[in-house]
C-alpha cells in the first residue's frame, strides 16, 4: 500500500536522524514499527530491516569518512568477525525461530536490557579516556562474533550492541560510532543476501525482504543518517542516549506484555 511506503520513509528519516549521532543505525527502533505499524510479517521483517541498514548506512558513513572519523583498524576488526556471525544468525532465524510469538519474546529480551544499559551508562558514564585500550584480539573477536549472531537473528546488524559494550571500556564515541556503523552496514549487506538465498530453501512462508518498503525506509534513513552525523557536534549526547534507552526499554516492555496476554 502507498501509505506504508511513505510511512516507512518518514520513520527511517526520523529514527536515523536521532540514532546516527550515537553510532546506531536505527534498525533497533525501526523493527517494531515495521512489525506492528507497517504490518511486515515475520520472519520477513528481519531481512527487510537489514535492507534498511544497507540503504541507509552510507549516509552517516559518508559524513563520518569526510570528517576523517573512519581512520584506524577498529572498524576492520569488527567487520571481520561480525560477518560470519550474522550469516549464522540468519540461518537460525529462518529455520529455528520463524514464529511471531517466539520473535516477540526475542525482541523483548533484547530491547529491555539494551534500554536499561543505555540509560544506566548515560546516568553513570564510564570514565572516558582518549587513549583507552581496545579489548584484546580474542575478546574483540568473541564479542563481534556473538553480536553478529544476535544481529543476524534480530535484523539490526549488531552495532547497537557493540557500541554500548565498547563505550563501557571508556572508549570515546568519536571512535566507536563510525566503527559500529561500518560493521552494521557491512554485516547487513551479508545478512540481507543470506536471507535472499535462504528464502529459496526455507519452509513455506515470507522469508525474503519486503523490497519496496525496505527501500523506502532506507532512503529515509540515508538522509536522516547524514543529517544525524552532521549534527552530532551540536546535539546533547546525554539527552540522545537517554531517549534511545527509554524508547528501547518501553518497546521491549510492550512486546513482553504482548507475550503474556
Image (cartoon, grey):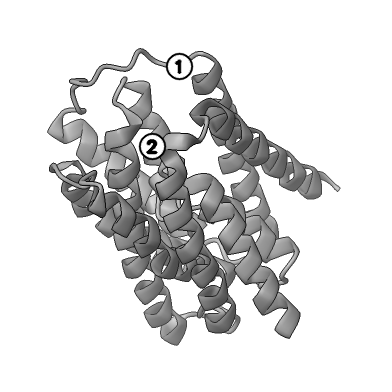
Asked if residue 47 can be seen in this view, the reply is no
Estimate the x, y position of residue 170 in percent, counting from the top left. 31, 20
Estimate the x, y position of residue 143 in percent, counting from the top left. 30, 38
Question: Circles 1 and 2: CB distance less than 8 Å?
Answer: no
Asked if residue 118 can be seen in this view, the reply is yes
Which of the two labelled residues, at mark 1 and mark 2, occupies the earlier sequence position? Answer: 1
Provide the secondary structure element on which disc 2 rests.
Answer: helix
Which quarter of the figure is the N terminus placed in? bottom right
Of 239 and 123, nearer the camera is 239
39 in relation to 128, above or below: below
**Residue at left offset 59%, top offset 77%:** 213
Estimate the x, y position of residue 180 in percent, counting from the top left. 33, 45
The picture quadrant where one finds residue 100 is bottom right
Residue holding disc 2: 163
* Tag shown at residue 125: 1
Q: Which residue lies most toward the front here?
A: 234
**Residue at left offset 43%, top offset 53%:** 151
Amino acid at each position: 500500500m502507498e501509505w506504508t511506503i511513505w510511512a516507512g520513509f518518514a520513520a527511517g528519516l526520523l529514527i536515523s536522524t536521532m540514532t546516527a549521532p550515537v553510532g546506531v543505525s536505527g534498525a533497533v527502533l525501526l523493527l517494531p514499527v515495521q512489525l506492528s505499524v507497517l504490518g511486515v510479517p515475520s520472519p520477513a521483517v528481519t531481512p527487510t530491516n537489514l535492507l534498511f541498514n544497507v540503504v541507509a548506512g552510507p549516509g552517516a558513513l559518508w559524513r563520518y569518512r569526510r570528517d576523517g572519523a573512519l581512520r584506524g583498524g577498529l572498524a576492520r576488526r569488527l567487520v571481520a568477525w561480525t560477518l560470519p556471525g550474522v550469516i549464522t544468525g540468519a540461518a537460525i532465524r529462518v529455520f529455528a525461530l520463524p514464529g511471531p510469538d517466539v520473535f516477540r519474546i526475542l525482541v523483548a529480551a533484547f530491547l529491555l536490557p539494551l534500554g536499561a544499559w543505555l540509560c544506566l551508562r548515560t546516568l553513570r558514564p564510564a570514565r572516558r579516556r582518549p587513549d583507552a585500550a581496545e579489548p584484546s584480539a580474542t575478546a574483540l573477536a568473541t564479542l563481534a562474533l556473538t553480536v553478529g549472531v544476535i544481529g543476524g537473528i534480530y535484523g539490526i546488524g549488531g552495532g547497537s550492541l557493540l557500541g554500548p559494550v565498547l563505550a563501557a571500556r571508556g572508549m570515546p564515541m568519536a571512535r566507536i560510532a563510525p566503527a559500529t556503523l561500518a560493521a552494521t552496514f557491512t554485516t547487513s549487506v551479508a545478512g540481507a543476501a543470506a536471507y535472499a538465498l535462504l528464502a529459496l530453501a526455507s519452509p513455506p512462508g515470507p522469508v525474503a525482504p519486503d523490497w519496496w518498503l525496505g527501500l523506502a525506509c532506507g532512503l529515509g534513513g540515508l538522509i536522516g543518517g547524514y543529517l544525524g552525523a552532521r549534527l552530532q557536534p551540536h546535539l546533547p549526547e546525554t539527552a540522545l542516549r537517554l531517549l534511545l534507552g527509554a524508547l528501547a526499554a518501553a518497546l521491549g516492555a510492550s512486546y513482553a506484555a504482548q507475550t503474556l496476554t
